[in-house]
Structures are given as structure tokens and as C-alpha cells.
Image (spheres, helix red, strand yellow):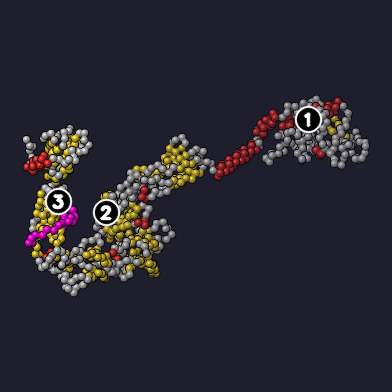
Amino acid sequence: MFPEGNVCSTFMFLLLLTTGAPAEKICSVHSKHEVHMGSSFQIYCIFRKECNKLVFQDEVLLKHSSLNSTTVIMSIVNLTRSTTFTCKCQHEPEPCGTDIIPGYPPAVPQNLTCIQQGEFGKVNCTWKIGWETHVKTTSHLWVHGSPPVRFESVAVHDGANSALFAVSGRQTNFSVWVHANNSLGSQNSTILSFNLNKIVKPQSPNITKVECSSRKCQLYTDNAQKMQVVEIQYKEKEKSWNPVLFKNTNSTTSWTVPSLNPYSTYIFEVRWKLGPTRGLWSEWTRIEGMTDEEAPVTMLDVWYTEDLTRTVSKSFQLYWKELNNSEARGKIQRYMVTVSEKGISNETAVVGKKFSVSCFPCNVSISARNSKGQSPARLIQLQPIAFLPYKVSHTPVNNHSVALSWPRPASADTVTEFLVEWFPVGKMQELQWIRVKRHLNTIHITGLQPAMCYKGAVVYLHSSGTKKANFSKISTWQTAPLQSPVPSINVQGEKVEVKWSEIPPAKRGGCLEKYTIYLSGSAGKINIYNVPHPQREVTIGDLTLGQKYKLWVSAWTSAGESPAENHRQFKPKPSRETLDEKHVLFLFLLGGIIFFTCLCLLCLCQLPSVHRRLSGCCHCLMPSIVPDPANSKWAKECASEEGEMKLQLHLSDSSMSEEEPNTVEVEEFPQETFSKGETVSTEETLHPGKLQAESSPYHTNIPSSYLKSFSNESSSSDTTQASRSTDITVDYISTHGVTSGQEDEDEDDDVYECDDGGESEHKAFEFFPCPKSPFLQPLISIGGKLTLDSVKIDCSDLLDCV
């Protein structure tokens, strides 16, 4: 039995069975190459020999059924994409196959229109082909006639075709239609009938030039013949079109467009047609033109700020906004600024949009000038602006806008107008402002940059003066600063002075609130110092000399902290100035301590009790054996011999030679007994108070004696005259004699002398000097005569020298 299928498929199958497959191939595939989208059908593979048969769909093995020993059949259901079917023997490399494409029959052609290109041109017809068929489809334009004429179509653009045909003879009425066809079906469009007068489309206008004054432009053409209707539309850039319709004659060569703005660029488009009811509109022709200038008629919007850093003289900065094209009516070449002070006016030409004025009080007028004239002058009376303690509230609206609100004035003075000014922090030159009517107290300021910090003020404009309420830290949204400040350090001994630069405004992330200084020591401890914005320097003390430190600075916004970067390392060292100051201070303190110590000791020495204690201390420092003249050899011989004894004293005389020194003969006499109540002169005794001292060991045992000297009568005599009689004048050994002579170096003579250069003062011992003080009287007072009993010295007498 034959498989089910349509009649055409069965017929083709039987025909193949009778004719056989091509000799050069092992097998062949029989099926339609184009089928309806989503249809089901059968495919036959016919083999020329017995083999193990395989069938693939896009390289995927399919199940199949055998019709006979050489034919297999596959049933395909709902095919929706292009596919390839392949048949082959298992051990044969050469396959056979076919491609099958699903598609649609053509749609009915739509939107058939025809236009004659020019009064004597060809007719061009265009139409839409409808949906995509996915298979090869052809379209033809048929023109009614006897017989109908078919014209091939060409693709114009996606989904559209067109065809041209020429007009022959005087035929003016036509009927046309489109026939679309593919392997799956065909379709015809509706018939379009037309007259050439209805479809004729003239050539586009040729505009040769445009001439403009300040308020109108005139357009010229060279091909307006036979055109009865002309349409011109015009606009300024970024604005809407304004149409103007003109009725034309054969002699018309230009058209005037009125009511234009001065110094403005306009775009003109022109089209036409043969008559009000004849033909179609031509294509648009575009051209540009610019109107001429006029003198400005609008006053400048001017504002000013006071320079608060100037304290000697008032200084103001004037700002003004540029006029727009419709206001300027030309290119502004310069601004004329006239300053009037004390009846004197000075005019200055300014190119920019700001000007500095140093006067008070004074009036300033500003006007804009172009090539045609000057605008009306704006008069400003410069006066200081007082500050109000009002709080200005703000609320972000979006990334580029903020809503501001402020309180109404409490005073009875009527506000004529409000003015809101603002600028990026650190960029006063970018000052902007907007004027607000007096009955409003809110405004939206726009054009702000995200992550940028702004400050400004609301200005209350009164008829009697000007006041403002400041605001700051305005930002649409904030982020952490993208960059940290760059610090510079100056180490001064145990202190370090830190300064840092401002972060660029684009890197701040909004409004800065504070700075943080991190100081890390070698031990790893980090000290943190916070500094409010806008302060940018700080001094850190109590550093350890010789220790390594690392320092960096970060900035903060309400959204976070900047990254840790720009580290600086340093090691504090003592400065030379610090060392010098310390040395000078140390020496000054040391000298002061020594001076006051000596002064206190000298003052204490004036007290008797202190004097005795110091004497006792000095007594301990004296040698343990003190020579006593009373126990000397000379004193003993004097005691054993009752008679007189000669004592030779060497007198110091520069005229005497060392070989024959001069001598003085001395005779000892017994001490006279003093009657009770008789006193001894200080000229005859060494220390009168000690004569009666009971503590002397020689007071009762050895009688006191004195020495008398015999003067030399002649320096050249070899003999010494001595006199034992009491008639001879007795001279006591004077202090000068002893002082002028040299110290006797004889071992047996233990005589010690005390002399400080005066006639009445003597040295007790060479090793124990007699001190002289500006606060003390001489401790030893000796008369001009010396007796032997006065030479008796004990330790207490010695310490009296102190």
C-alpha cells in the first residue's frame, strides 16, 4: 500500500520509481523545498542498493520506516524553521539530501501610490509588500491597457517596492495594480485609477540667496515658472516652525518673510505646486539666513558683592548677566561702566562680565553696547550690606536642584524684591543669582553640580537699604572625598607644624566638615587630631626626640572619609636654637645660685655664733702639732740664763751683702711687776687681754721678758757696741724690722710671722692666711712693739685670726 499523502507527492514518487535514481549517486531525496510554515509532510529517500540506511535532520539521527527494499519514508510534523535532511548508507561516505524552507504566501500589496516626476516625467508607483514571506517572492506592476503591460519592480527599502513607467501620447488617465507571487501562493492589490494632473509633482525650488535686515528676510529663486502656490516655513534653532503661504504668479522670483527677531539665525524651508487643485507639493528645499543687529533695548541684570577683606577703603565687585540674543539684538562688543562720586563721573569700557569699584558712597551705571547702539543704563547705588540672623532652609529636589525657603522680614520696612545669590565654595567668580518677587519666600535654584558644595545668601532689597541672610553647605548629594589633602610638615624640636592644601572642588564629594590628622609612632600607637573645616594647619607638641613618626591627613564629608594617602615620615631632632637657649638658661641659673649662696654665707659670717662655729670647724682642719715659741730653743736658753743674751736678727737691706749681714743686739730684762690696777699699753704688748688670761700655761711658771735692741752706730764697724746700763735708749723690735727681714731658716728657730702688708697687722702662719672681708673688721690688731711673752701662742689665739 502507498502511504497517505497528497496526489502530487504520490505521482512524483511513482515517477521516480519508474525512472530510477541518477547513476552517479547512491541515493536521492524527494520532497518540496519550500513548505508552509508549521505544516506536516513526508520525505522519501530512494537507495540504489541494499544497505543499512540512515536518515538525519540537521545531523540528528531520525527514526524512519521502509516503504520497500530501496525506499524509506519520514513524516515531518509542524516544521517552523529551515532545516536540512540527509540520507546515506552506513558504510558509504557519500550522502544525499535536501534543504527545506518553511514560509508564507505573499500578502496583498498595500498603499499603492503613483507620482509623475515633473510635468513631462515618468510615473513612479510604490507599494508595501506586507509581511515577510521567508521565501522568494516577486512583484509586478500591471498597467491597464490593451493588452495590460507588466513592469518589473525593485526594492526601495524594507517592505516597499516601486516601479517606473513612461507616459506615451496624450493619455492622462491610468489604472494600475500589483501582482505578488511565490511558490506558496499569489496575491493582487486593488486597482488604482488616476489622472496625471492629480499626480504631477514639480521639481523642488532652487533658492539662490537670502537677504535679511534686522526684522525680515527675502528669499530668491530662479525656477518658479508655472508655480501658483508657494509655502515657506521658518524657525529659530531649537524652536518650532512658523508657516507662511504665498500665492504666486509667473513673474514672481522672491518672497519676503516678516516679523523676525534681530541678530537671529533662521532656518527656511520652501515648497510649491502647480496650482491650488493641480498636482502635488514638491519636496522641501532648506536654507539658512541671519537677521541684522539693532541697539539693545533691555537693561542688564546687575548685582554686587562687598570685599570684606578691605578695611582701609570700601571695595565692591560688580557682576552682570549676559543678554540673550533677543535682548542683545546683536553682538555685545563691550560694557560701559560709569562711576559717579562727589559729582565726578568716570566712564570705563569693560569686555568681561565683572568690574571692581573702590568708592563709597557712589553710584554706578552699566550698559551694553553693540555695533548699532547702547542699551538703557542700569543704575546701582553701592552701599554696605548688613547681615540678618535669619536661617535659610534648603531641601534637595534632585541631583541638580535645591529648594530654598527663608523667613519674611519682621520690620515694617517693605521689601521691594528678594535676590538669591549662590556660588561654589572657593569660586566666587562663578556667582549666580535670581530675583524673586516680594510676595514669595521660596525658590528652586537649578543647574547645580552633584557632589559640589555651594554657599550664598538671600538678599532683602529695601527702599532704605540692603540686608542679607547667609547660608552655606548646600549640596544636592554627597559622597566621601575622592582625594586626601597633601600635608607639609615643619619639625621644630619636640613640635611639628602641619599644613595641608585644599582638595580640588571636583574631588571633595560635597561639603567638607572636618580634617583628621593621624600621627603614628614607632611603637604603633596612632594619635588622632580633629580640625574643623576650613582650618588647614595645626601644631602638635610633646614629641619624643629621635623617634620616627608617620603622619597623614584625611578629609570628611557627611558621607564618609577620604582614603589614607600622602604619608609623611619625620624624626624630631633638637634644634641648635633650643640647645643654645637651654645652655644659656642653665648657666644663668647656675651663676645665680652661686651668687646668692656666697652672699648668704658672707652675711651669716657677721653673726658671732656663726663665726665661732666656723672657727671650730677650721680648728679641726689645722695640723695636730702647732709650734709654740715658748718651747723653742731660744726661749729655753733665755730661761736658763738669768743674765743678758744677745740675739742677732738679720735685717733686710738691699745694700747689705749676704756674707756679712747686719745684726741687732738684743738684751733681755726681767719683766717688771705691775701694780694692781695698772694697765699695759697696746703698743708694748701683742694682745693685752691675754696677759691676765688664766688659761696660759706660762703665766705662773715663766716670767715674761722683753727684748731691747741696740742700734748700730755704724754700718762699717766690725764690733757691736752693747750697753747694759739703763741709760741706753731701748728700742723694741718693730714690726717693720721683722717684716722687712727674711724668714730664718734655722731648724732650731721656730718663729712664725703674720703680715698682710700693714704696720699693725701680722700673719700668724703661712699656711693659715688671715682673711679679709668687706664686712669684717681686722681680726688681729697689734701694736708697734713686740715682747716675747706676747709671742706665746695657743690654738685659741690662732683661731682668732679667722
- Is residue 683 depicted above or below 355 in this figure? above
Question: Could you give the CA–CA distance between mark 3 and mark 2, rounded to whole angstroms?
Answer: 62 Å
Q: Is residue 263 visible?
A: yes
Name the residue at 15% across, 70% down.
Answer: 228
Q: Is residue 35 left or right of residue 526?
A: left
- Is residue 154 depicted above or below 760 in this figure? below
Circles 2 and 1 in contact, beta carbons < 8 Å: no
Kindly report the secondary structure that dominates the magenta region of the rendered protein. strand
Q: Secondary structure at mark 1?
A: loop
Residue 444 shows which numbered tag? Answer: 2
Image location (x, y in percent) of residue 346: 39, 68
Q: Is residue 398 left or right of residue 497?
A: left
Which residue is tagged 3? 137
Image location (x, y in percent) of residue 10: 8, 41
Q: Where are the magenta residues, as a range?
A: 145-162
Which residue appears farthest toward the bottom when viewing the image? 251
**Is 360 in front, or is 442?**
442
Q: Amino acid at mark 2?
A: His
